[in-house]
Amino acid sequence: MPNPIIKINNLSKRYRIGAEEKGDKTFRETIMDWVCAPINNFIKLRNLTKFKNNDLENVIWALKDISFEINEGEVLGIIGKNGSGKTTLLKVLSRITQPTNGFAELYGRVSSLLDVGTGFHPELTGRENIYLNGAILGMRKKEIEEKFDEIVAFSEIGKFIDTPVKRFSSGMWVRLAFAIAAHLEPEILLIDEVLAVGDISFQKKCLGKVQDVVKGGRTVLFVSHNMGVIRNLCKKVVWIDNGKVVQKGDVDEVVKDYEKAQMRQVDKSSYIIERNPEEIKNSSFYFNRVEIFNEKNERTTLFRYNEKLNLIIGFAGFPLTNKYSVEFHIYNELGQMVSMGASGSYHDKYFSSNVKKIKIGIGPLTFTSGRYRILLKVLSGGRYYDIWENAAGFNIIECQPFKTNHEMSVFREGACILQQSFDEIE
Amino acid sequence: MKLVIKPKKGLANLDFKELWYYRELFYFFAWRDIKLRYKQTILGIVWAILQPFIAMIVFTVIFGELANMPSNDIPYPIFVYAGLLFWNFFSTSINNVSQSMLRNAVIIQKVYLPKVILPVSSIVVAFVDFLFAALIFGGVIGYYRFIPYFEGLLLLPLLLFITILAVLGLGCFLAAINVKYRDVHHALPFFIQLLIFITPVIYPVSIIPKAYQWILALNPMTGVIETFKAGFLGTMPINWMTFGISSAVSIVFLILGLWYFLKTEKTFADII
Ligand SMILES: Nc1ncnc2c1ncn2[C@@H]1O[C@H](COP(=O)(O)OP(=O)(O)OP(=O)(O)O)[C@@H](O)[C@H]1O
Ligand SMILES: [Mg+2]
């Protein structure tokens, strides 16, 4: 019988919001405000810290009666949409902020990674920041000294170690920050969405490191929006919505339900994408909108393995020639182009210049689960009129093509699934 | 090890065992501030030295020469520098301490730490400035071939201690206020500078009628600076009454300031 290392009991956290500023003010108002400001601020701020029961509209419960337990050595994923309370939960568990009600018991030393590079100072060198950030994250000086070479090697910043970090590229900065964080060894580790930044090959390396930590028997709470990563790292998952636990259980089950729920409420702006006019660089013919549908003609950005995808693309302006051709490229989260197509050169399909709306059908999508982005190009007479870098994005979910229901993710199982068979011969 | 997280009413308690555990982080914060202060080595040190030195020259010209301020028969530059030495330590560290929460806002939002270590560690860099300024003081004394009472230096630790109590008390209060009322910190340095005029830096307490001197003694720095001048420069016998009042006020400041800080610190991460 494994022991719980964290017990969470009816944990709630209330935040007070508000104290917003008003819009444009006249000079007189500004002066008057200035005169009254100390009094007003005082009242406002008293209200910010003092809770009165009668004005509930300015109050939100970021966490409401959360209860669950985590066993020693368990890796627990925490999922939920934006603003559901994931970060707040980690903040309460790491004592950054106090709960309003309820309690939690932790049996072990806790480190939290809500961000990478906390406390980095641009004027200090890489070496100095390793010590500072390490100490802030709770490492002892001796520990930092012991791991120093490892951290530097992991970060791949090499001879820049004695350069002030303000001269680092943002990639180097993130790598160094990750490298320090990756060498934390507390008994309980709380990780917020920190793997979501940084360049992709390094992200993979960090993921590997986190996996090592996990295998080392540490207890980890891991927040992520990336279901592929969650499926990879965690056996158990808690799904939080609106500060409440919706579901807790085995990863496959919870993630599947979560994705189903998400599927029902994908934001409109993600499947109907209007072109940002600033991106159009004085081209006479350009993309102005794209919509994504599934094969049932429903608008969505979530596709299961092997489903088909349709793009409806709108153009504006006039090409100088009377025919044009369209190209698409699909990139995965690792930045690799996983597929492409071109109407003209591959299909000998050219659109007449008065056609302003076209449809591209793509699929079946045999990609592994993860996020994908589509780039669009329009060309005519051998020149590109317009390239739309981030035209649309979609997610592959539930990529479980095989009998064992194993989730195939871009981080572990490659870019796509090929037909396969295993037969005995001798 | 068991850690219970639950809502706490009232004061955050000072957990000395925990503070001891966090001593390294304290050290790293102090080290960071010093590094940043003296990063452009020459400029940093020059500034630490020049600031009190220029103030000394300006005050000497205005108050020593033009206004003929009495200085107990001691060369006015020495008289005023003795006061400036402590005054600068006081005002620099008050400034540092009162900004310590906002300056470290990101850290407060992202990791747990006993927050008191931030104000305390931000005094250290002001103390390094103090040491440089003291060096220059030695030079000024040598320049005037003035013989001080070296046994007066024995008072130094006590005087610094009283100063730090006052700084922590006032500073922690201001640091907490700064988190809540964001616009305060623009005005603060200016008001702190003004306090120099109710502190016997440029004038001796003796120019004030005896009956009212105790009012001045309510300013903690009065006791510190007067005692230093009396003990080290030998301007007059030490007025233990003044020193006693100032010390008592410092302790009261410390208690009130720390009380307010500990009472409000649990909300810092939410509103900073
Ligand atoms: N300091 C604060 N003051 C007031 N409200 C806050 C504060 N911090 C968070 N909130 C609110 O609490 C709710 C939960 O926020 P939280 O950051 O925990 O969400 P999250 O699940 O981490 O979201 P995301 O996926 O975007 O990171 C949100 O509505 C947020 O606006
Ligand atoms: Mg969050």
Image (cartoon, rainbow, N blue to C red):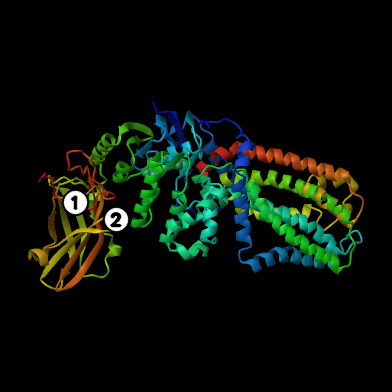
Residue A266 appears at what percent x and percent y? 25, 44
Identify the residue under disc 2: A334
Indicate the quadrant of ligand 1 in the picture: top left
Tell me how far mark 2 sits from mark 1, CA to CA.
22 Å
Is B59 positioned to the left or the right of B16 in the image? Answer: right
Please tell me which residue lies in front, A59 or A74: A74
Residue B258 appears at what percent x and percent y? 66, 40
* Category of crowding for the residue at label 2, using alpha-carbon neighbours closer than 10 angstroms: few (below 14), some (14–19), many (at least 20): some
Q: What count of labels does the image hold? A: 2
Q: Is residue A367 above or below residue A223?
A: below
Residue furthest toward the top? A1
Identify the residue under disc 1: A292
- Which chain is disc 2 placed on? A
Quarter of the view holding residue A211? top left
Q: What amino acid is found at the position of numbered circle 1 in the picture?
A: Ile
Residue B243 appears at what percent x and percent y? 84, 45
Please tell me which residue lies in front, B15 or A87: B15
Q: Is residue A205 above or below residue B46?
A: above
x 55%, y 31%: residue: B8
